[in-house]
Amino acid sequence: MKKVLIDCDPGIDDALALALAAGCADSLDIVGVTTVGGNVDLEFTTANALALREFLQMGDVPVTPGSAGALLRRTVRATAVHGDTGLGDVVLPAPRLGPSEGHAVDFIVETLKAAPGEITLVAVGPLSNIALAVRREPRIVQWARDLVIMGGSYTRGNHNPAAEFNMLADPEAAAIVFEAGWTVTMLGLDVTLRATLTSDVLERMRPLGRLADLLVPAAQFYGVVTAEGGPAIHDACAVAYVLDPGLFTCVPAVVNVETMGEFTRGMTVTDFRLRDRRANALVATAVDVPAFWDLVIGAYEKLATRLG
């Protein structure tokens, strides 16, 4: 069993990533979910995480809210992509249980401290909570088994030409995280935009009972689905990497996050020419798309059987 702590901002692709994790209960132990303001405001990301915990039958996994916004910069949101409340047209049953007490930063620090070397941090939203946790307790860099993020790119942006959304939403936090002394495994747009949801994949989701009530409308809200391509469910790539790193090709690199540029703020400046420098990142450069979808759909099928 691999232990993971998922820091997220649900968000359509966060929801599909949580469903992937929930569908792998035989191999993935989710020790906690922490939320951050990102795709939508913190009140919505937390409410969505709580609703998803119950809908996906994730049991008593603690859900702990964290940072509402960026450390220094103005708030950036993606409601045009995810809808006003974050899950597009999907309306899940209201959760019966509320969030855990306390703050996500404290939860991250205390959870890693209690099990050093055992838990992989999976961060699929802005890195505000992770940066504050590093500042609160720098030893989490040693305590975490790994840090896997969905974010950044070495070739392009999506929110603007230079920056991927999670990096642009809190570039100062991202800079702190990349400079903290651990090796960040970065699943960026370079691979997530290859793992697109085609009409064939969508047809594999339709028979999945109650789970399809989440997956299908969420995917269709996210973008136009055709036989050739469709929306990328970015965040699922980070969970898929934890489940099977062999799906991805990752290359050591030095990654710096631009915090000052007028037009490039949030850009992950990636240099694969290490020379005598230590790599601070493993950057994903390729993904086995058919195998990726086989893993994802297989997990969804197992989860659908459990949900009915």
Image (tube, rainbow, N blue to C red):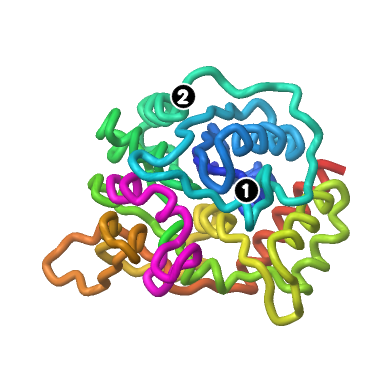
Image coordinates of residue 104 in percent, x first then y, are 46, 29
Q: Residue at x 63, y 46 (%)?
A: 18
Residue in the foreground of this view, choosing between 23 and 175: 175
- The answer to whether the residue labelled 2 contacts the one labelled 1, judged by CB atoms less than 8 Å apart, is no
Quarter of the figure that contains the C terminus: top right
Q: Is residue 43 visible?
A: yes
User: Which residue in the rendered view is the most extreme toward the top?
Assistant: 101
Number of numbered discs overlaid on the protein picture: 2
The boundaries of the magenta stretch are 153-176
Q: Does any portion of residue 3 appear in the rendered image? A: no
Please indicate whether residue 224 sits to the left or right of residue 60 in the image: right
Residue 131 drawn above or below residue 168: above
As drawn, the residue found furthest toward the left would be 276
Q: Determine which of the numbered discs, if any, sits on residue 264 in the image.
A: none
Seen at 66% across and 47% down, the residue is 15
**Residue 159 is inside the magenta segment:** yes
Give me the residue at 78% from left, 73% from top.
199
* Residue assigned mark 1: 11
The answer to which image quadrant residue 28 occupies is top right
User: Horizontal and vertical percent for residue 110?
Assistant: 39, 24
- On screen, residue 43 versus residue 227, left or right, reads left
Q: Is residue 276 left or right of residue 113?
A: left
| Pointer 2 or 1: first along the chain | 1
Label 1 element class:
loop
Q: Residue at x 55, y 70 (%)?
A: 193
Per the image, the residue denoted by label 2 is: 103
Q: Is residue 204 left or right of residue 176?
A: right
Q: What crowding class fits label 2: few (fewer than 14 Cα within 10 Å), some (14-19), or many (20 or more)?
A: some
